[in-house]
Image: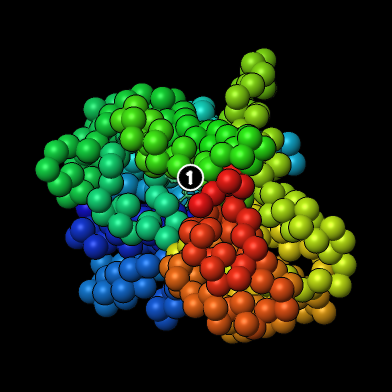
Amino acid sequence: MRITIFGTGYVGLVTGACLAQSGNHVVCVDIDADKIARLTRGEIPIFEPGLEQIVHDNVRSGRLRFTTDAAEAVAHGTLQFIAVGTPPDEDGSADLQYVLKVAETIGAHMDEYRLVITKSTVPVGTADKVKAQLAKAVAARGADVEFDVASNPEFLKEGAAVEDFMKPDRVVVGVDSDRAAEHLRALYAPFNRQHDRTIVMDIRSAELTKYAANIVLATKISLMNELSQVADRVDADIEQVRRAIGADHRIGYHFIYPGCGFGGSCFPKDVRALAQTAGQLGYETEIINAVERVNDRQKNVLFEKLQAHFGDLSGKTIAVWGLAFKPNTDDMREAPSCTLMESLWGAGATVRAFDPEAMNETRRIYGERDDLKLCENGEQAVEGADALVLVTEWHIFRTPDFTDIASRMKQAVLVDGRNIYKPSYVSQAGFTYYGIGRSAAS
Ligand code: UGA
């Protein structure tokens, strides 16, 4: 099939590359000429396992092209995906100007049938706005061209996006015509594996499904984080509790890992946006608001543990392992590491930090400053430190030589923000250990 993707951000690029990989001819279009030039040269702007290879392979085979020419892009694809950003407004609701601008562009250029699909996470009702915008742009030219709109939200995890796209749990397709449904069923047929993964529904339900999925997941995390705070105070070990409750199939083991709060570009934004949508319609959400409040509080937990141990943190040096909001990405949006570092600086401490992928991003966000030393590896980061804080559970941090680490530090204090270490094991190496919700841990 011939596909056009508007927006070469994280979602657009992964979608374009993966659809080319299954044999489609894909044109990715973006207004950022520099980005398009770099992509055409094979430079991938984000770190995403497996993505570079499939972009290279498909560019070489001619199935994947990049352009800034919107007219050419509209002429190319029968299916036109909108995957541009929807940054939050000041009040937390999604800003739709870029999505609607693309709809206007498609309407201004299309000469034959087009199926226009929203892939960006957009508030319920956006497809209707896209439809109205398309109709307006087509009418303004006095043209008479048929089109459909559809909603096809993505469920990709950063760091596993290619894998998630190629082997989806489900593909959600929101349509209001059989013609649109057939196009999208055909497009996703190669990704079905043993059974049909495509779930066809009405457009508004598809739009809500995206928010519902992220909010259920974010709620699980906030609930576990709240329970970890209780565990801390009643001298229980949340890790033992987690293993026991996860064994109940109705609860399950996924997304019940307590930690230092969720970050990223999706959960925090989507939680806020749905609360906002409901609020505008006169319904004050309760649980959803609490999910955000609990998460904001949890992001302070690492700093609070350091403060409880040291009292005054001024003049202290704190080593931070992991800066990205989670492993396998260089994304630091809403990362707990940022909350921690900013609090430490506010208290007069110095940070020595290392992340396997996010060093450039850290430099970009914070620039040069005396109280931030960016280190080349984990060992260098702990040199002379008063405490080590594990913020992101990258594989490389899983089994360090704790005796060696302790010998490099001024004081052997470890705050384990993801409960990845065995407290008795690190204690043997001389560490004072603090985990999340495991003060009585063994
Ligand atoms: C999330 C969803 O998992 C995807 O399905 C969705 O498509 C995507 O948002 C999106 O809306 O685009 P992502 O933001 O990449 O994906 O990250 P996750 O892997 O879901 O992790 C989110 C945060 O939750 C991370 O900060 C992680 O450390 C934290 N987390 C996750 C926990 O603290 N505990 C857990 O048990 C699981």
Residue picked out by circle 1: 239
Q: How is the image coloured?
A: rainbow
Which picture quadrant has residue 189? top left
Q: Quadrant of residue 233?
A: top right
Q: Within 8 Å of ligand 1, the CB of disc 1?
A: no
Residue at the image position 54 percent from the left and 49 percent from the top: 441
* Image location (x, y in percent) of residue 101: 56, 46
**20 shown above or below 360:** above
Residue 293 x, y percent position in the rendering: 69, 35
Residues 349 and 233: in front is: 233
- The correct choice, above or below, for 52 with respect to 231 in the image is below
The amino acid on which the numbered mark 1 sits, given as a three-letter code, is Glu
Q: How many marks?
A: 1
- Dot 1: what SS? helix
Residue 131 shown left or right of residue 301 in the figure: left
| Crowd around label 1: few <14 · some 14–19 · many ≥20 (10 Å) | many
Q: What residue is at 29 percent from the left and 69 percent from the top? A: 54
Question: Which is nearer the eye, 292 or 129?
Answer: 292
Q: Is residue 271 left or right of residue 296?
A: left
At horizontal 68% and vertical 79% (from top left) the residue drawn is 409
Question: Closer to the camera, 152 or 37?
Answer: 152
Q: Tell me residue 18's x, y (percent).
A: 30, 59
Percent across and percent down for residue 361 are 62, 71
Query: Which quadrant would residue 114 be assigned to in this image?
Result: top left
**In this view of the protein, can residue 145 be seen by the observer?**
no
| Residue at (22, 53) in percent of width and height | 1
The answer to whether residue 429 is visible is: yes
Q: Is residue 194 above or below residue 219?
A: below
Residue in the foreground of this view, choosing between 413 and 143: 413
